[in-house]
Image (spheres, rainbow, N blue to C red):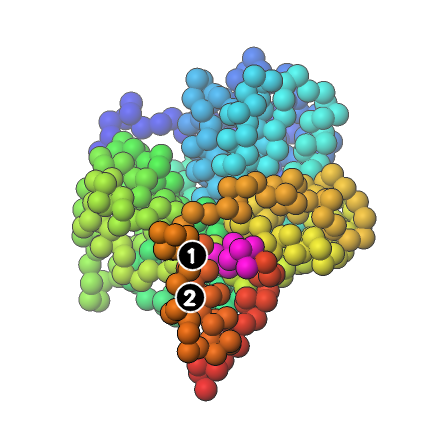
């Protein structure tokens, strides 16, 4: 148990009377602004109030974390460094929330690299100091448009909020944990058989209390899949509590999990989501393992449903001594592997055609369709940032251009003209003279040779169909279609 002076002060969570005096029931978008009292002039109240925002301020990162997790703001404005600390971890922590805010970072002109890192971590926009009220107003408007594009039927998001009688103690819990349940709909856009299998598997294991272990590259939707499992489970009416394992310290674990009034302890009966489990410190791993081993079986309900996720190769992190094997196997009961976007047949086109008109409507643009040439480039691109990168590309195109159709010139340079390292690969298996073993193909039909070459090329390109399509000089859709035909024949 932490001593009283070690427990972070929560008194700062309460709103100042001046913060709520102007509120009316229709001003429901909550903006959390992180700045020291001396820097408040950078973020004056007026632009936020004119945009219909309720503004809440935080003076440091602990204060921001407390308010972010309790109030679940729609918008978050914060400097790249607060009190000498980089905010990248804070951004990741917010991204793991059930309803993550739209994040705008504030930087100076000498922080361009740090700003780019923050954008990669999930920030939506960056304001470079000094900026005018007009630039701030535009950033607020764009961020609010993003909220509307996420789910147009849910704007505005928040009722005006009164001062709480006492500060809350739970990070991810609503004021009344039993008052509402998570949305039961599936927000994952997919038509591919790969993702259909993933979603079917997720729904199949949702009713169980078994721990789930989700793997997938960055931006593939691990958090969204975890929320789908929670929403489809008998625990859906109980709290969802997300933990950013990269920032979890022994002190925070003790205060959140071991204190009966701690944030996670109050989520008992719900789902505990361990985001990026492979980045959990070695000091915290035995504490979590002890908690896992205390779970009871039989007639007594399990305290939590554990869902863990990682973008790393978990077994490799075990070999390197970064992750305890016993912790991994305790969590790795129901594994689900999320495929990268480039390997989801048809999903790039489906997602792009669905989201482009939504973004265009939010920004007052005319885009409704995507030209065949632009779609071919998008389907051939590697998408290292997966779904998150695709949505960013569409959003940027809408912000910078206008028209009825999205064309190649509206796409970024890396998609229109891939770098040589994205095209040239050295993993192909050839003989020492550089020639393929043609003798192995003798006796096969042309159709069998075609299938053999295509499958071998896909394997040589690390399983990536778009990269194999580049090597073979065909469109990815051609390979997808042929593979579906082969699977259909094999099933007959």
Q: Quarter of the image holding residue 6?
A: top left
Q: Nearer the viewer, residue 133 or 325?
A: 325
Label 2 SS: helix
- Foreground: 243 or 51? 243
* Residues at marks 1 and 2 touching, judged by CB atoms closer than 8 Å: yes
Residue 393 visible within the image: no
Name the element at disc 1: loop
Task: Calculate the distance from the C-alpha at mark 1 to the C-alpha at mark 2.
Answer: 8 Å
To which residue does mark 2 refer? 438
The furthest residue to the bottom:
492
Please, is residue 332 above or below residue 262 in the view?
below
**Residue 232 image offset from top left, x and y in percent:** 44, 64
Q: Which residues make up the magenta segment?
A: 462-472
Please tell me whether the stretch drawn in magenta is mainly helix, strand or loop. helix
The quarter of the image holding the N terminus is top left
Residue pictured at 68% horizontal, 32% vertical = 139
**Closer to us: 447 or 31:** 447
Q: Residue at x 47, y 28 (%)?
A: 87
Look at the image and say whether residue 307 sits in the magenta stretch.
Answer: no
Point 66% across, 25% down: residue: 45
Please name the residue shown 57% across and 71% down the image. Answer: 481
From the image, tell me which residue sits under label 1: 435
**Residue 76, located in which quarter of the rendered image?**
top right
Horizontal relation, residue 407 to residue 246: left or right:
right
């Amino acid at each position: 148990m932490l001593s009283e002076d070690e427990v972070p002060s929560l008194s700062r969570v309460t709103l100042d009377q001046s913060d709520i005096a102007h509120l009316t029931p229709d001003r429901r978008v909550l903006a959390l602004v992180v700045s020291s009292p001396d820097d408040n002039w950078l973020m004056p109240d007026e632009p936020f109030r004119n945009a219909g925002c309720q503004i809440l301020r935080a003076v440091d990162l602990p204060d921001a974390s407390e308010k972010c997790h309790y109030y679940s703001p729609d918008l978050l404005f914060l400097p790249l460094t607060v009190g000498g600390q980089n905010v990248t971890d804070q951004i990741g922590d917010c991204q793991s929330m059930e309803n993550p805010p739209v994040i705008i970072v504030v930087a100076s002109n000498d922080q361009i690299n740090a700003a780019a890192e923050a954008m990669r971590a999930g920030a939506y926009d960056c304001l470079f100091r000094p900026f005018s009220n007009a630039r701030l107003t535009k950033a607020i408007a764009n961020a609010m448009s993003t909220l509307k594009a996420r789910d147009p039927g849910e704007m505005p998001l928040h009722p005006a909020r009164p001062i709480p009688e006492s500060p809350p103690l739970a990070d991810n819990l609503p004021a009344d944990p039993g008052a509402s349940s998570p949305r039961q709909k599936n927000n994952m856009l997919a038509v591919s058989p790969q993702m259909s299998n993933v979603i079917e598997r997720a729904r199949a294991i949702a009713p169980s209390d078994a721990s789930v272990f989700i793997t997938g590259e960055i931006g593939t939707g691990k958090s969204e899949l975890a929320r789908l499992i929670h929403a489809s489970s008998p625990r859906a009416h109980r709290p969802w509590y997300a933990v950013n394992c990269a920032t979890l310290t022994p002190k925070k674990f003790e205060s959140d999990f071991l204190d009966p009034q701690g944030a996670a302890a109050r989520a008992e009966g719900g789902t505990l989501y361990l985001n990026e489990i492979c980045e959990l410190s070695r000091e915290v791993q035995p504490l979590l393992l002890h908690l896992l081993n205390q779970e009871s079986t039989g007639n007594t309900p399990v305290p939590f449903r554990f869902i863990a996720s990682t973008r790393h190769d978990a077994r490799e992190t075990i070999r390197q001594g970064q992750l305890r094997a016993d912790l991994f196997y305790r969590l790795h009961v129901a594994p689900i592997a999320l495929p990268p976007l480039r390997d989801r047949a048809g999903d790039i086109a489906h997602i792009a055609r669905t989201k482009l008109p939504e973004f265009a409507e939010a920004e007052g643009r005319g885009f409704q369709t995507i030209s065949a040439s632009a779609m071919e480039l998008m389907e051939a691109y590697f998408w290292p940032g997966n779904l998150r990168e695709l949505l960013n590309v569409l959003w940027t195109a809408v912000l910078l251009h206008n028209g009825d159709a999205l064309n190649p010139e509206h796409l970024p340079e890396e998609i229109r003209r891939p770098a040589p390292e994205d095209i040239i690969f050295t993993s192909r298996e050839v003989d020492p003279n550089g020639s393929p073993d043609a003798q192995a193909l003798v006796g096969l039909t042309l159709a069998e040779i075609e299938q053999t070459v295509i499958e071998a090329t896909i394997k040589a390109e690390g399983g990536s169909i778009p990269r194999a399509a580049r090597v073979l000089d065909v469109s990815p859709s051609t390979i997808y279609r042929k593979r579906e035909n082969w699977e259909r024949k094999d099933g007959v």
